Amino acid sequence: MSEKLEIKPTTNIENIVATVILDQTLDLNAIERNVPNVTYQPDQFPGLILRLDKPKTTALIFKSGKMVVTGAKSTKMLIQAVKRIIYLLRKHGILITGRPKIQVQNIVASGDIHAQVNLERAAYLLEDSMYEPEQFPGLIHRMRDPRVVLLIFSSGKMVITGAKEEREVEEAVIRIAGRLKELGCLKPRI
């Protein structure tokens, strides 16, 4: 049945989480005083929160000069956000020396193989998988190459996490779709 089934997997990046290192210490009190739209409550959280509207992202900025930037939906958007944060800080009198070092920590994406998945069969035949429907309705598959985790649902929809590069998301979904088809775990959606 699944031999004739044509699969056209699709993916969509939902969130990129990255660390940014500025290689200098920052005066968070000065940033709070001078930069608009920031939240800093050191008694509750050691970082300062800076939200951008364009691109729609959030940065947690720490005294150490490290930042965590979330909310970007592409690497290009992430780089835009970091440039905008640096620009905002400089514009409001915060001295930033050197270039920021950006490292993607995690990409979370959604995917769809546009076919029903027999999760029982997939769990039995697919190595590095776990399926306990009483606890969670999806199959958890730990892919080794690329190194990501896929949460696969019977609808053919999935969540991909752990990627460090955008291409890994597409690669993982194409690879798992092919493997599920090969194992006879797919059937057309009704």
Image (cartoon, rainbow, N blue to C red):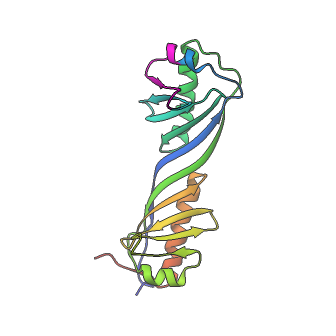
Residue 171, by quadrant, is: bottom right
Residue 101 point in image, percent of width and height: 68, 35
Residue 157 point in image, percent of width and height: 40, 66
Residue that appears at 45% across and 76% down: 132
Residue that appears at 64% across and 22% down: 26
Residue 80 point in image, percent of width and height: 53, 33
Q: Is the residue 127 above or below the residue 145 in the image? A: below
Query: Which quadrant does the N terminus fall into?
Result: bottom left
Residue that appears at 51% across and 18% down: 32
Quick one: 40 or 78, which is closer to the camera?
40
Quick one: 24 or 84, which is closer to the camera?
24
Q: Is the residue 50 above or below the residue 77 in the image? A: above
Magenta residue check for 43: yes
Magenta residue check for 7: no
The residues colored magenta run 32-44
Q: Is the residue 6 above or below the residue 107 in the image? A: below
- In the rendered view, does 167 fall on the left or right side of 49? right
Residue 27, by quadrant, is: top right
Quick one: 150 or 63, which is closer to the camera?
63
In this view, the residue farthest toward the left is 190
- In the rendered view, does 54 fall on the left or right side of 100? left
Residue that appears at 42% across and 76% down: 6
Residue 64 point in image, percent of width and height: 67, 29
Quick one: 47 or 186, which is closer to the camera?
47
In this view, the residue farthest toward the front is 43
